[in-house]
Amino acid sequence: MKEQKTTQTHSENESQSLKNESKNELKNEMPKNSPHSQNAGNSQSPRQNKSNRPAKKEVRGTFLNNVVGAVLIFIAIISIYTYTEGNKAEIQKITISELAADISAGKVASVSVTDDDLSIVYTDKTLKESKKETQSSLTETLANLGIEKDKIAAVKIDNKVDSGVSYWLLNILPFLFPILLFFFMIWFLTRQARGAGVQAMSFGQSRARLTTPDDSKVKITFKDVAGAKEAKQELAEIVDFLKNPKKFLDIGARIPKGILLMGAPGTGKTLLARAVAGEAGVSFFSMSGSEFVEMFVGVGASRVRDLFKQAKLTAPAIIFIDEIDAVGRSRGTGMGGGNDEREQTLNQILVEMDGFEPNEKVIVMAATNRPDVLDSALLRPGRFDRRVTIDLPDRGDRLAILEVHAKNKPLAEDVNLIVVAERTPGFSGADLYSLMNEAAIVAARENRTKIGQYDLIRSIEKVMIGPERKSHLMNKKEKELTAYHEAGHALLASVLKHADPVHKVSIISRGRAMGFTMKLPLEERRTQSKNEFLDDIAMSLGGYVVEKNIFGDLTTGSSNDLQVSTALARDMVTKYGMSDKIGPIALEASSGRALFGQGVADKEYSEAVGTTIDGEVSKIMNEAYDRALTIITEKRAVLDAIAKALVAAETLEQKEYEQILVVHGIELKKKEVIVEEGVVITD
């Protein structure tokens, strides 16, 4: 059970936005429960099951689009060619007699002779063309026309001879170009149609991402994974089998074919799977559970077969399926029919896992944060028979994770990661990564080259609650109300015996909260008792009690407190068996939808039992309210002192807050350390 990290109090006066959010949630939920709703990834009509008509329509449409595009390109090329040729300046053509007269008059600068064609350049840069006789040269022709030799010598005559290749190209190209363009269009269209057809037929191929053993850039080992000591010990056996399978096979042992990694989001399930492959030096095929299922029937099962085929060809190998609950949910729960595409994919996974031989050295690993909804056939011996639970990191693991994420970050001299680890109970590895990254962003935004302790502390609050809303300025009345609201929470947390001590109180807006009270446990714990739950509920009602009995009015700032405390009281009655009247009965599954692999309704009890549950929840809440009211009435002087300090400073750290408590005679909570001589109370 994830430990409650902070108590957040909201004072936004956003009742209208809460109503709108509730309406939107109802709209989003209605289609999901409708019997006529269709799941594009899982449900198929009978016609779609018989053929791949959507694929054919897609290919036909692509081909027609390509034809239209090619025709438009052809028309554009012809238009450009016609426009270019039409805009060329026309060159004047003259007779040979006119050329002779111009040469005699000294107007011609040069003449280029290409076979019978003459290109004439005049002294004024004018260009003209003419033709001569085929049998005689230009000089002979001009002499026969009576042009003097000195006049002919004054003109530069350049005789050009076309080579065979250029001659034939100039004569054939006007006819050859349209033919080549036509064949290019045919090739382009057939290539596009063939590509669309191949793509339509490749749906059944696996899209797994392969990481080879020699890929050093993405290779990860157990040294790169901080914390999770027990999980790494469990997985070390898998590494040993992949390296030395003969040792296990000779003694008749069979390594588990499937390893299921279970844990909260962000605890490092995928990272551990990659570390196993990196330690063993084997190929790593990774794929998400949602990538198996498509809109076409049979695609998911085909991809499963292709994935396992690839893994067997590259054995030893690891197949990793992330979020396997996307295809591995319990069958027969009414979610989809018996021919549901998701169920076909699950059936194929079960068959492939059961068909392995001991010497094939292919291991399947999967990760999920919802193991309670998986089908029982997946969890039976011979499939996912080894289950590795990855818990949230404790204080030592959090310190190790912070040190890993701080390797490439310049830290200031005042940074103490031990304090950061103590302030982050319930944080996952992903939360700690986000914390270090946010601290680096804050330091860079403020033009500093090193990350300070203050940056890390601010990042903790940002990850927990949200960023500061500096633009939200409260008026005097709101500030006083928020200060008393948070003081009520803090005072109850300090007085109640089983509540966690307060580390910080603030009335600076963060995220959707107008203020917050941060309380952290004295030591790590995995379970919580009934008395701790009752004190947490009373502490959550501290702001509500203060607003109602001191200010004589209620605001929307207590909405989140009421939601959290009411949900906790209901869980005590229906899940944890902490109600004397109901007794030791679990009336709701932890997920609310599936219990022991079976589909369940939202309620598994009668209306009479439901009425009793509501009465027990109301009783817990009212008793917590009375306890909170009694303490706040008796400790009114301490409440006023905390509220005034908050109005003045806006934020009270642990030492400043505890000084107020000591002045008013409230004993501070201290940690019990057990030693050989007995119990010693320390600071």
Image (cartoon, rainbow, N blue to C red):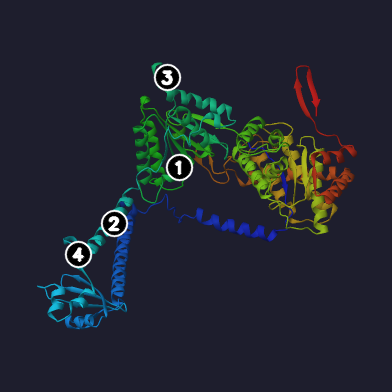
- Say which label, 4 or 2, has the lower sequence index: 4
* Few, some or many residues within 10 Å of mark 4 (<14, 14–19, 20+): few
Query: What type is the residue that disc 1 sits on?
Result: Gly
Q: CA distance from mark 1 to mark 2?
A: 31 Å
Q: Earlier in the sequence, mark 4 or mark 3?
A: 4
Kind of residue sitting beneath label 2: Ala
Q: In front: 602, or 630?
A: 630
Q: Which residue is mark 3?
A: 248
Q: Nearer the viewer, mark 2 or mark 3?
A: 2
Where's the C terminus, which quadrant?
Answer: top right
In the rendered structure, which amino acid carries the disc numbered 4? Leu
Asked whether the viewer can see residue 117, the reply is yes
Judge left or right: residue 253 versus residue 654.
Answer: left
* x then y, percent, for residue 665: 89, 37
Residue 81 - label: none
Distance CA(mark 1)–CA(mark 4) = 55 Å
Q: Provide the residue designation for mark 2.
A: 193
Image coords of residue 155 (percent x, y)? 24, 74
3 or 1: tag closer to the N-terminus: 3
Q: Which mark is on residue 176?
A: 4
- Type of the residue with mark 3: Phe
Q: Secondary structure at mark 2?
A: helix
Residue 227 against residue 634 in the figure, above or below: above
Question: Depth check: 378 or 403 in front?
Answer: 403
User: How crowded is the residue under tag 1: few (<14 C-alpha within 10 Å), some, or many (20+)?
Assistant: many
Spatial CA span between label 4 and label 3: 73 Å
